[in-house]
């Protein structure tokens, strides 16, 4: 199913902001600068990366995010390390599974979650799950 980037962003905002730990009790983004949320700052690239993957393996989506989003993100250093990711401060990384899930659902794709524990990123956490 074809969706515009704006449609996908709206769907992902509805899904992620609702559960984001940075959301205030009144339901607004609690970041000092809401526009600094990496997930939505780079959303066109996020959506493109996820839509470019046609795989049953969630790891391929993680690789696409690293290659197409993290690679242009100012938080990642030249060695591919990201302090925000390491400290579980990147919303995109922290909620990656939910983001992929929302886009997959919106576009009618499906993937197999059985490999989730084989790749957990720099933090050692399962993508999409915050401690
Ligand atoms: S940090 Fe991002 S995901 Fe979280 S509430 Fe703000 S805009 Fe939504
Ligand atoms: S994990 Fe780091 S480099 Fe990747 S999008 Fe998040 S802040 Fe940027």
Image: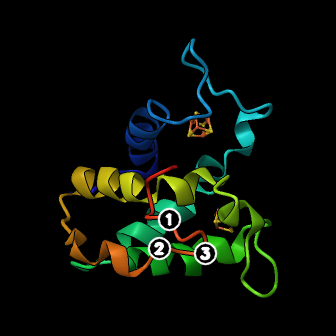
For the point 27% across and 58% down, the residue is 104
Does any atom of ligand 2 lie closer than 8 Å to the CB of label 3? no
Relative image position of residue 74 (x, y in whole percent): 80, 66
Measured as percent of width and height from the top left, residue 84 is found at 72, 60
Mark 3: secondary structure? loop
Q: Earlier in the sequence, mark 2 or mark 1?
A: 2
Q: Residue furthest bottom?
A: 79
Point 46% across, 67% down: residue: 48
Q: Which quadrant of the structure image shows residue 88?
A: bottom right
Kindly check if marks 1 and 3 are in contact, taking CB atoms under 8 A apart as contact: no
- Categorize mark 1 by other alpha carbons within 10 Å: few (<14), some (14-19), many (20+): some
Instruction: Reply above or below: 57 against 12.
Output: below
Query: On the rendered structure, is 124 left or right of 12?
Result: right
Whether residue 58 is visible to the viewer of this picture, yes or no, is: no
Q: Position of residue 110 (x, y in %)?
A: 18, 66
> What is the number of the mark on residue 120?
2
Identified at 44% across, 53% down, the residue is 129
Q: In this figure, which residue is indicated by the disc labeled 3?
A: 122
Do labels 2 and 1 touch, CB within 8 Å?
A: yes
Ligand 2's quadrant is bottom right
Give the structural element (helix, strand or loop) at label 1.
loop
Q: Is residue 123 left or right of residue 62?
A: right
Q: Quadrant of residue 127?
A: bottom left
Q: Which residue occupies the foreground of this view, 125 or 37? A: 125
């Amino acid at each position: 199913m074809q969706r515009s980037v704006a449609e996908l962003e709206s769907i992902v905002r509805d899904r992620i902001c609702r559960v984001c730990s940075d959301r205030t009790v009144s339901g607004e983004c609690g970041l000092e600068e809401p526009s600094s949320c990496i997930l939505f700052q780079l959303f066109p690239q996020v959506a493109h990366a996820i839509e470019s993957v046609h795989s049953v393996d969630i790891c391929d989506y993680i690789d696409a995010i690293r290659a197409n989003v993290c690679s242009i993100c100012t938080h990642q250093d030249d060695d591919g390390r990201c302090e925000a990711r390491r400290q579980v401060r990147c919303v995109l990384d922290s909620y990656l599974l939910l983001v992929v899930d929302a886009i997959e659902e919106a576009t009618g794709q499906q993937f197999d979650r059985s490999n989730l524990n084989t790749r957990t990123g720099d933090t050692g956490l399962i993508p999409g799950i915050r401690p």
